[in-house]
Amino acid sequence: MASMMSRLVSSYGALVERHKNRDFLDAAMAAAALVAIADGDASLEEGGRVGELLRTLAPLAVFDPAKGLDIYLSHVADIRRGEDGLANAKASVSSAAKDPDTAALIVLICEAVSEADGIVLEAEIAAINHISDLLGVNAADVRQVQASME
């Protein structure tokens, strides 16, 4: 009986964690898509980096990486379709502005995606700066904190 109860508590905890992080997942995947497509196309390396982040970052690791990648690819496809997709991606990103730590983590995810193919273009930097504005954080401050932790 105790093992059934512990499994129930564990399952409940995982469900709560997924629910709590669902908006973060969507915001992070939308931001990654905005950066990936900033140069005109989302590269395989950028998609690979998104998959890697989904497997390794604790707030994202509670999700099936394939589901996260599907959300990312869906945002990329929507952005390619036009202004509505772009507006929806920006709205998803903006929803994470409530929590400064979450916002900073999204900026770091964007940085990682921009570096995936080994070349960080001005268009990607501009996209990260715009995402930072949407989130209400200063990208330069986030980079400085990240550099001090390395």
Image: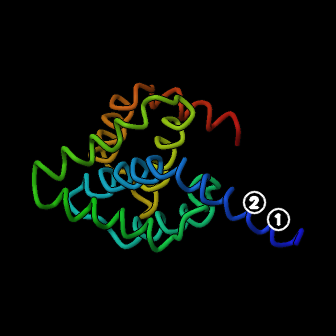
Residue occupying the point 39% across, 31% down? 135
Q: Is residue 22 above or below residue 76?
A: above
| Mark 2 burial class by Cα count in 10 Å: few <14, some 14-19, many 20+ | few
| Callout 1 touching callout 2 (CB < 8 Å) | yes
Mark 1–mark 2 distance (CA, rounded to whole Å): 5 Å
List the residue tagged with mark 2: 9
Q: Secondary structure at mark 1?
A: helix
Q: Nearer the viewer, residue 144 or 19?
A: 19
> Residue type at mark 2?
Val
Q: Secondary structure at mark 2?
A: helix
Q: Position of residue 132 (x, y in %)?
A: 39, 33
List the residue tagged with mark 1: 6
Q: How many marks?
A: 2
Q: Position of residue 51 (x, y in %)?
A: 49, 68
Q: Nearer the viewer, residue 81 or 40?
A: 81
**102 left or right of 35 in image:** right
Residue 103 visible, this angle: yes
Q: Position of residue 33 (x, y in %)?
A: 32, 56
- Of the 4 image quadrants, the one containing the C terminus is top right
**126 left or right of 48 in image:** left
Residue occupying the point 45% across, 61% down? 118
Residue reaching furthest to the left: 82
Residue occupying the point 39% across, 57% down? 119
